Image (cartoon, helix red, strand yellow):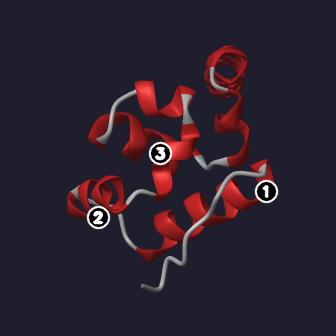
Amino acid sequence: MTYQIARQIYQRECIHREQAFYYPFIEYLSTRTENAIRKSLGEDLLAAPEGFSQPENLKKMICWPGVGSVVLQNLADGLDQAGYESFDPKK
């Protein structure tokens, strides 16, 4: 059982590292935020994170189930840390 759990963790880490190679911005986001972005906005936006602060993209994310203030705060912090234009998640 412990081997299986360790293997799953290792596989998830390998997948995350592979994605970070193609989309460097992923390193600044939590897994939950990354999944919400991928499902609601598409993977193309992960390659060009400048579009995250646009109001129409934020509206699409808020309408997605499970996306709340924590995910938006994580996205705003990630944009700020990566050096992109951020937004105020409280608005």
Q: Name the residue tied to disc 1.
A: 81
Kindly identify which numbered label has been placed on residue 62: 2
Give the quadrant of residue 41: top left
Query: How many numbered markers are drawn?
Result: 3
**Residue type highlighted by circle 3:** Gly
Q: In this rendering, which labeled residue sits more in front, label 2 or label 3? A: 3
Mark pair 1, 3: CA separation = 16 Å
Q: Where 47 sits versus 30, above or below?
A: above
Q: Amino acid at mark 2?
A: Ile
Q: Judge from the rendering whether residue 25 lies leftward or rightward of residue 32; answer left or right.
A: right
- Marks 2/3 in contact by CB < 8 Å: the verdict is no
First in residue order: circle 2 vs circle 1: 2
Circle 3 crowding by C-alpha within 10 Å: few under 14, some 14–19, many from 20? some
- Few, some or many C-alpha atoms within 10 Å of disc 2 (few <14, some 14-19, many ≥20)? some
Q: Earlier in the sequence, mark 2 or mark 3?
A: 3
Q: Which residue position is annotated with label 3?
A: 51
Q: Position of residue 44 (x, y in %)?
A: 42, 25
Q: Of the residues under marks 1 and 3, which one precedes in the sequence? A: 3
Which structural element holds mark 3? helix
**Residue at image x 71%, y 25%?**
6
Q: Residue furthest bottom?
A: 90
- Residue 88: x, y in percent? 54, 78
Q: Nearer the viewer, residue 53 or 26?
A: 53
Q: Is residue 9 above or below residue 29?
A: above
The Cα atoms of the two marked residues, 2 and 1, are separated by 22 Å
The secondary structure type at the circle numbered 1 is helix
Q: Between residues 33 and 12, which one lies in front from this camera angle?
A: 33
81 lies left or right of 65: right
